[in-house]
Image (spheres, grey):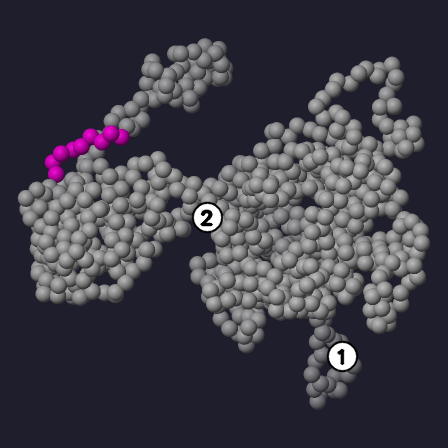
Amino acid sequence: MSKESFPSNHEYQDPEQEAPVPHYEYEDEDRELDEALENIWDIAHEFHLDPFPTHFEIAPPNIINQLGSYGIPGRFTHWTFGRQYRQLKTMYDHGLSKIYELVINSNPSQAFLLENNPPIENKFVMAHVLGHTDFFKNNQLFAGTRRDMPESAARDAERIRGYEEKEGKLAVEQFLDATLAIEEHVDPYMPLRLSKAEELKIWRDQAIRSQKPQQKKPNEFDDMFGPQNEVTAKPSDKIAPPIPPSPDRDVLGFIRNHAPYLEEWQRDVINIVRGQSLYFYPQRRTKIMNEGWASYWHKRIMREMGDRDLISDKENESWWLVHSSVVAPGRQSLNPYYLGMTIYEYLEDYHNGNLTDSEKQWLEKENVPVPPRFEGELKDSPATPILRDVMIHNDDQSFIRNYFNKIVADRMNMYVYEERMNAYGDVFQVVKSTGWQDIREELVNSMNNSGTPYIVVVDGDYNNGGELYLRHEFEGRSLDPEYIRKTLPYIHTLWQRPLHLETVDSESNKRLVYAYDGKKLSKKIVE
Amino acid sequence: METPKNWYTSVSRQDWSFDRRGAQDEARHNEKVKESIKDNLENLVSDGTIITADPHSKKTIKVPMRSLELPRFRYGQPQEGVGSGDGSEKPGDVVGKKPQPGEDGEAGDQPGEEYYETELSIEEIQAMVFADLGLPRIKPKGAQEIESDRAVFNDVRKNRSANNLDLARTVMQNMMRNAIETGKAEIGNISPEDFRVRTWENERQPENSAVVIAMADISGSMGEFEKYITRAFCWWTVGFLRSKYPNVDIVFITHDTEASESTEEQFFKRGMGGGTKCSSANQLALDIIDERYPPDRYNIYPLHFSDGDNFSNDNEKCVDLVQGLLDRDVSQYAYVQIGLHGRSQLLNDYESKIHDPRFKGIVINEKQEVLSALKKVFNPKEQID
């Protein structure tokens, strides 16, 4: 039907030149997918989705696994991606899991389809992907991300290859190891960082400006000299501001600027890793929202495809099967697709007045007004613009905090479990509570700083000896000491001067300071 | 003209067969895993499947290895989590069991919990173990210079079989010829006259004649563990000597209250009952040295394994005999005491009465200590200046 209103590419060709196109293996399948994509795109638009232009590339499994392990096409090489690749490949080979969809946040967006998926699964994936590219384009957290990341990452990779040739593969690998070990420690609110000289100048100016005017102590002879003496002392410009002036969350950026012995190529490598970490940061913070949004919409778009007879009954059956495996509940860990989709569906039902009687009763008991039932199509419903608003303005933590409630918890049969060890050392997961507030609290707490410990640079010239003093901003959970011991040497590779890390032991509630001087790790309790 | 509709979305395919980054980085990861096996050697050294293998077999063994990860600051293991079930769950219900590391091959959801098996050949493991071992205090002894079968490529010739073509030199030669003939130093028109071929000589090196005298207690008190450790230690010793010192003699002695010389095969298989007199083995070692291995021609390394459960009136005799061996100018005398019973009187007597750096008393209480014991007994850094 859309064929008529939008002629396909073939019809633009000069009829005289319409020579028979040579057949190739996948011709029929590609045409089928092309047609389906047009329909999917149209339906997505009717539902008010607003995705980036999205190009789908059909690729073999090893390439999909490879892209999945690197995260960005063309990214630099490193053995940690190789480890990831191996893992994905093994899972795929053993039929344990496969990557269905892979989509890159860029404009235009690039998405990848698995070549040996049956066409209906790829149609399903297309619908899902448009949910993602809509999310990338519109969620406010993504507003500052680099939409040219694939090109930029490829240029970065090229430079790193150059460094490998010049400095040796091993030297570059070891430096990347050190940098990647702290890649999460960037400040998403300060993506652009000035150079060292600019930064120091600003810090110094600020320090001069914020000096208190120096008041002279009143003196009993003051009045003898008259008013001319009352000139306040000029603020001194011989002031050394602390570096950094306030705790700095951008550990990588701080090290790039202020580590004493780094070479130019090393600063560039830090910069590359820092830029890519910032690029991934919004994705880490919107896993539930993003996957939920894509799942919510693939379900509705595919349902519409079925209703309009654009896919066969058999195809209809098979995408529902894939759908139910994508949103399958997890007994020991939450499935973000399932949780996200359930919250959006609850919001839709709430705003369109489609809740069950017992759900309504609960809301009424909580003094929450229940909107009237909406009779009509989803695309015209009051829920649709509200859901878009929710999608645009939240991250996972606020999404849960604002919209998770008893109805969602009950729909998903959720519980909080705790781990208990028996006499033989086996660890079991035991249900602790099924109360929705407990579940919400557990979820919200686990999302602090998207699950990564919050580390700041407190002093870059500690002991007046250029030592680095880091602090873990304690939020109730202590760091794994084994990993402190293993990570500090990597930071030392970057800083090359003694290091300190302050943290809190949650059991004793005491402050601990770890120190590492390049050879020895020590730990002391401070008051 | 109207913009084609699918300007903003399309499907395409391309040829990916040249993109091998994933495989290359995977290879690098696997290489690093193998390197990290060195940190795990102490477990491998006492692994049962290795020490029952023929040291020359091409057999490979599977070693469970943790995949490598970059460390990062992370929280201690979560004590709590959220899941969803079928609605029947009540507080107190068990909803799952945490897999123990290595319990099944599946990847855990925690980073670093992935285990998989790496295949290593016996040879590869041996190379890692042997890297740090050598005969201590070895002196040039014995008159003969032995031709080893090691060929050393140390010369380049023209007009030889092109099997060992030295490419760099051949190209250099070709460029030089072109420079002479055409005035341009470029590669091209390579002809047989450019060929430069590497050739070899059999290396001659002075051989330090040596003999290791391995003595094992096979009395009734030697339990499964003691026998196992003796076996493991000797398996590595024999393998290491054969690979690094092909001309070293190994003499095997087994004893309870009486000692006898045995073949290698008997040494590894024999088990007996009865009491223990360690002096019998030391006496036999002394006799064998006097008979066959004059100390001025051989570096001699007696090596005695026992659980230390010796007849107490025999200890003094042992001390005298070991002193006698040291007086014969042996390079080292090592006494390896195996067992879970703590230090024996025999070891105490040895250590209180023998004051000679060439005497080594070593205790092995656990399987994992075999490697460090091997390194102590065969420490190549202990040499005479």
In the image, residue A483 lies in the stretch drawn in magenta: no
Which residue matches tag 1?
A230
Determine whether, in the image, residue A224 is placed left or right of residue B5. left
Distance (Cα) linking label 2 and label 1: 77 Å
Q: Nearer the viewer, residue B79 or B5?
A: B79
Q: Nearer the viewer, residue A102 or A215?
A: A102
In the rendered image, residue A185, in percent from the top left (x then y), is placed at 63, 56
Q: Establish if B133 lies above or below A245.
A: above
| Up-down relation of residue B325 to residue B350 (above or below) | above
Kindly identify the amino acid type of the residue bearing the numbered disc 2: Met
Closer to the camera, A518 or B266?
Answer: B266
Seen at 37% across and 19% down, the residue is: B163
**Residue B65: image tag:** 2
The answer to whether residue A162 of the structure is visible from this angle is no
Instruction: Say which quadrant the N terminus of chain B sits in.
Output: top right
Q: Which residues are magenta?
A: B142-150
Secondary structure beneath disc 1? helix
Determine the chain carrying the residue at label 1. A
The residue located at (80%, 16%) in the rendering is A20
Q: Is residue A295 visible?
A: yes
Q: Write the residue at 74% across / 40% down.
A: A318
